[in-house]
Amino acid sequence: MSGPIPIMSREDKKKEIIFNDGIRSKLHKNIERLNFIKKVDLIRPLAEALWDKDGKEIIDEISDINEIRNKLFHRLTIKELKFKNKLINTEDGIEEFFQVAQQKLGHLDHLIEFIETKK
């Protein structure tokens, strides 16, 4: 498509589209097919707007956690894995990893609640 963005439909038509289960189902299936990082990138603008300067750090840490998870999943040497400059095979490292992971889950829950209230 080239040129200007088309004019949106009438207000009642917009509501029909937003609450259409078939359209919503197709959108959900498309999102499910995205890999984790693409899903994170999809919510990045909303997170950064919602949490201001902390939003970028929150999303970046979620990506870092996923990277560690991938490396563990692919059985890369745990002795070499670091999170926030701490080796993941040490008590301090694993504690930091789990604390941050738990915090990020809380942030994602907050984001989900925010989205749910906007329906």
Image (cartoon, helix red, strand yellow):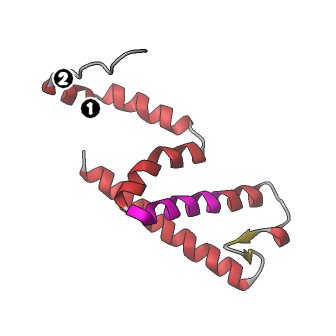
Per the image, is 88 magenta? no
Left or right of residue 18, residue 102 in this image: right
Kindly identify the amino acid type of the residue bearing the numbered disc 2: Lys
For the residue labelled by badge 2, is the local secondary structure a helix, a strand or a loop?
A: helix
Q: Is residue 13 above or below residue 33?
A: above
Give percent across and percent down for residue 52: 38, 62
Frontmost residue, 41 versus 28: 41
Q: What residue would you read off at disc 1? A: 18
Kindly identify the amino acid type of the residue bearing the numbered disc 1: Ile
Which mark is first along the chain, 1 or 2?
2
Most extreme residue toward the front is: 3
Within 10 Å of disc 2 (Cα), the crowding (few <14, some 14-19, many 20+) is: few
Q: Quadrant of residue 48?
A: bottom left
Give percent across and percent down for residue 44: 47, 50
Q: What residue would you read off at disc 2? A: 13
The Cα–Cα distance between marks 2 and 1, rounded to whole angstroms, is 9 Å
- In magenta, the rendered stretch is 52-66
Q: Which mark is residue 106?
A: none
Give percent across and percent down for residue 69: 69, 60
Left or right of residue 90, residue 4 in this image: left
| Residue drawn at point x = 56 percent, y = 43 percent | 38
Per the image, is 59 magenta? yes
Q: Which is the main secondary structure of the residues drawn in magenta?
A: helix
Within 10 Å of disc 1 (Cα), the crowding (few <14, some 14-19, many 20+) is: few
Give percent across and percent down for residue 4: 33, 19
